[in-house]
Amino acid sequence: MNSVIVNPPTQPIRTEIRLASSKSESNRALIINALTQFKGQLENISSARDTQTMMRLLQSSDVVADVLDAGTTMRFLTAYFAVTNQHKTMTGTPRMCERPIGILVDALRILGANITYKQNEGYPPTELNGFQYSGQNHLTIRGDVSSQYISALLMIGPMLPDGITLELTGEIGSRPYIEMTLQQMRAFGVTHEANWEAKTIRVPAQHYIPTHYAIESDWSGASYWYSLVALAKDAEVELLGLKENSLQGDSAIVKIMEHMGVKSAFTKRGVLLTKIPADKAFAWDFTDCPDLAQTVAACAAVAGIEVTMTGIESLKIKETDRVGALQAELPKIGGELVELEQNTKYIVRKKAETPATPPSTPVIETYDDHRMAMAFAPVGMVFPVEISEPHVVAKSYPSFWDDLKKVTTIA
């Protein structure tokens, strides 16, 4: 199937959705459990392709570890295979091999990893040729590029003879994901000392303790349902398996969507979404939740809400250049993403004199990016929208289209 068309619902939406489990939590839990010699018990592991790829590669004896397009899997496994002294060639899709990994490789080399680049300096594929601890465990690493580098190093820290101390420079992006990593490590018995003012995190040498760990549902996946409720004329949706005090940074969607016309009421089973009046304009810093930016942008463009966005610089090195992708696709639904300050400040808004309904069904290109497909799908609550390459959702939310069919017609 090369495309799907999402059509506006013909009746009020009343449904409950059991979301996919969190890819972010699952991927961390898998690495930590592997460091217990796989002695823990993990419950509700994500069915997302990224997580299934992680599971397969952790269990594989193959010399080549092909992560496909999974950035988290690439970064976490590079650190894991290095510290466990495994000889591996790390590779992935052509786009994966355009995504930088130099900061992590430099840090692992300082610790004692023997890693070489097979093609381009600073990018996969890489070759891991063993590990001999250098005795140097105090690392300085940028905090404003990818929290996944930091999480990868923290998780292997307890395995080093002297533990690890990270000193972060610059702004700390996606801090909730770093805190998620530390809290999951704590669940497996590992302690740490974090001084966020001084931007240092110390993890002493210690052993992970095998445990039973249950994965929460995915707040990133929840964001598309928030957008759907915001855009639908009449909707009430209960999302099952979510926690009010979540480890996931994307739970920020609760606060964001209050501005966009969605109220959250937590229940014993999850969270109930209902409609409330929306603001005409607001500003949000996406530094700690960059994966929500596409969802908010598409929703705002159709709803006619002006959103000033900061903290979206990291979107340019994701599955695609997501800033460029939004600038290409938003005009098709009557919106635009305008750069106000170079690489730091943007505004998304409805273009002036835009008709309420496009003259023909817009066709949204997804650029091999799961979040482009799911961010634009809720536009179908207002007018028909065609999503190209719908299979890309398998990366994080394989059942997305089946769940969406519960509330509207998909052709």
Image: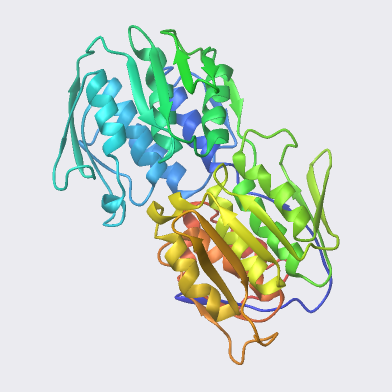
Residue pictured at 53% horizontal, 49% vertical: 311
Q: Is residue 65 above or below residue 12?
A: above
Q: Nearer the viewer, residue 403 or 204?
A: 204
Q: Is residue 151 visible?
A: yes
Q: Quadrant of the C terminus?
A: bottom right
Residue pictured at 53% horizontal, 23% vertical: 182
Q: Is residue 234 left or right of residue 407?
A: right
Q: Is residue 232 left or right of residue 37?
A: right
Residue farthest to the bottom, as pictured: 359
Q: What colour scheme governs how the chains and residues are painted in the rendered image of this protein?
A: rainbow
| Residue 216 found in image quarter | top right
Residue pictured at 39% horizontal, 60% vertical: 320
Q: Is residue 234 above or below residue 354?
A: above
Q: x, y percentage for residue 367?
A: 41, 67
Q: x, y percentage for residue 239?
A: 74, 50
Q: Is residue 55 above or below residue 398?
A: above
| Residue 374 found in image quarter | bottom right
Q: Nearer the viewer, residue 17 or 99?
A: 99
Q: x, y percentage for residue 207?
A: 44, 9
| Residue 217 found in image quarter | top right
Q: Is residue 34 visible?
A: no
Q: Nearer the viewer, residue 114 or 20?
A: 114
- Numbered-mark total: 0
Q: x, y percentage for residue 50?
A: 43, 46
Q: Nearer the viewer, residue 277 or 409?
A: 277
Q: Is residue 182 above or below residue 394?
A: above
